[in-house]
Image (cartoon, rainbow, N blue to C red):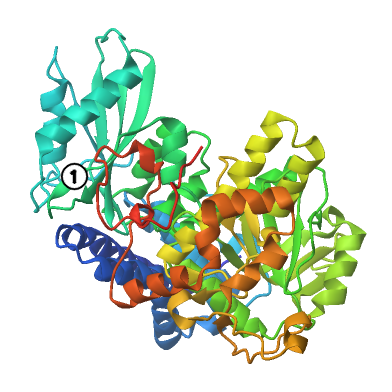
Amino acid sequence: MFPERLDAPQAYAIARAMMDGFNRHYRLFRAESARAKHRFETADWHGQQRAQRERIEFYDLRVKECVRRLDKEFGAGALPMEVWHEVKLHYIGLMVNHLQPELAETFFNSVTTKILHRTHFHNDFIFVRPAVSTEYIESDDPAARPTYRAYYPQGDRLHKTVVRIVEDFALQRPFEDLPRDVALVMRAIRERLGAAKLRTNFQVQVLASLFFRNKGAYLVGKVINGYVELPFALPILHGEQGGLIIDAALFGESDLQMLFSFARAYFMVDMEVPSAYVQFLRSLMPRKPRGELYTALGLAKQGKTLFYRDFLHHLKYSSDRLRIAPGIKGMVMLVFDLPSFPYVFKLIKDRFPAPKDTTREQVQAKYLLVKQHDRVGRMADTLEYSLVAFPRERFEDALIEEIQRHAPSQIEISDRDGDGHQEVIIRHLYIERRMIPLNIHLQECFDTGLQQPEARHALEHAVVEYGNAIKDLVAANIFPGDMLWKNFGMTRNGKVVFYDYDEIEYLTDCHFRRVPPPRSEEDEISGEVWWPVGPRDVFPETFVPFLLGNQAVREIFLRHHADLLDVQFWQSHQERIRAGHVYDVFPYDVQRRFQAGGAASSFFSQPSSVSGAMP
């Protein structure tokens, strides 16, 4: 029985303080996101990158602020559990008519779990399931901007409607030639819709905020005609003449999936009701999990919350067991998966065999670097969790033995409730989208037989994409370190993505050198390195033996990416990045661009590269 009269005022005050902490967080988060428009208009690319990086830290800072306040004002860590039950009930009351209730629930969970210091938590004290619906949330403020705008072109006035849609965003930088760009958009729409008859409900719906990331702004919406809904996005960039251009027209779920890929950094979007944005985006990409959409919008903590709920639901309605992931085992990370679930779980081993020379703290720092960096579609995003409990019966024995052998500090097996049902608690792990390791993909091509046209095409595509992935990483000032095929994966969309981060470095921190000439005949025939090598020295000529041992792979690689073996390629890009140049890396096939040559700063406009075409 709860001591209601004694603790109710205190419990309400705690709930109010927690809600104040969340409201401060979202107010700052939204303000920083809204400023992305000005940075885009003024071409403040370094400021945009800095803001994207700093915004990632907002959530944890606000959680720590709230915890300090609760400890100082209420002695929160010493309060009995009955008070926390009351706090949760009052907090639910405060979420009525709130515009971001799902985010407020996650903030409550974060603060509570920091204060209670439990190894894992009773569901009574946190929101395992949502307590407040996010359906049909709208602001009562008459001056508030709606989530999306609807336009109703009549007859042949679609051209004027598209002009109006663009102008309604009131970008404070002129377009180079908006009528020209809109004509190109119209041509793309006609090619996509064909001679379809315009129905009574013909309309265009557009989200009210532009989506900003790196050097681009994206106008996102859908065309509705009868029973057909066509998702679209219009990338807006800075052109060579300094004005704005509509660079391409993206249509359909596949194009939008690529734009909102898990391998790209988070958008900056000014949203009053984030759940309404997610609902609209899901109508464009119904196969995209809601958690990934929240993450794409910069709300990574909410993405983690929804992912965990999805995982618990999947466990309930599946029966397969967690196992050691197929493929070559890594020296730093231990990887396992659930065959029926499209993700992999990675934990850092306690000890690393030679030649690995790193520490757990350094590996975690590399993963944080990737989290805060523009991943340009080539580095998988990771979800980081601590003290995660799994049912013991869902583990294969071989996996338990593997963890106990290589990472004993990261595992605990307990019977918390004393009912005979054991739990496996993993202290710290990363979760990533599952991909086909590139070495396995290549082997499948060989096993099929390169005399088969499909296998030859798949091999060529994989090798070309591998080189394009490295070049995109170079454009983002990233050197992957360990460039072995096994550290890259193939996505379901045919995109090659890097996912092994323990040796990653900023490109500008590396020293790219030529192999010095042999000093003697003994040096020339020696299998050993005869020259001094520093910790960040890289010799591109030496990539050949461990990357291109297969003749078919070598031939394709040299035809498309021989420049990656030339030290001048790496040094020239280092110089441009150090000089402050920021490359464009497009989340769409560069052949889809309207303007031949387009923005001169494109990485793929450089003579040393081939098209980064996406299938």
Q: Say if 127 sits above or below 578 in the image.
A: above
Tell me which residue sits at (47%, 60%) in the image. Answer: 471
In the displayed structure, 214 sits above or below 513; it is above
Q: How many discs appear?
A: 1
Depth order, front residue of 506/278: 506
Element assignment for label 1: strand
Quarter of the rendering containing residue 498: bottom right
Q: Quadrant of residue 594?
A: top left
Figure quadrant of residue 332: bottom right
Q: Which part of the image, by quadrant, shows the N terminus?
A: bottom right
Q: Position of residue 157 (x, y in %)?
A: 12, 19
The front one of 165 and 465 is 465
Check disc 1 and report the residue beneath it. Answer: 245
- Side of 234 relative to 514 (left or right): left
Tell me which amino acid carries mark 1.
Ile
Q: Residue at x 39, y 82 (%)?
A: 69
Residue appearing at x 8%, y 49% in the figure: 174
Q: Estimate the x, y position of residue 601 in percent, counting from the top left.
A: 28, 58
Place of residue 131 in the rendered image (x, y in percent of width and height, measured from the top left): 49, 49
The answer to whether 26 is drawn above or below residue 459 in the figure is below
Confirm whether residue 437 shows in the render.
no
Place of residue 423 in the rendered image (x, y in percent of width and height, measured from the top left): 80, 63
Q: Is residue 419 left or right of residue 433?
A: right
Q: Residue furthest front?
A: 521
Locate residue 155 relative to residue 388 in the image: left or right: left
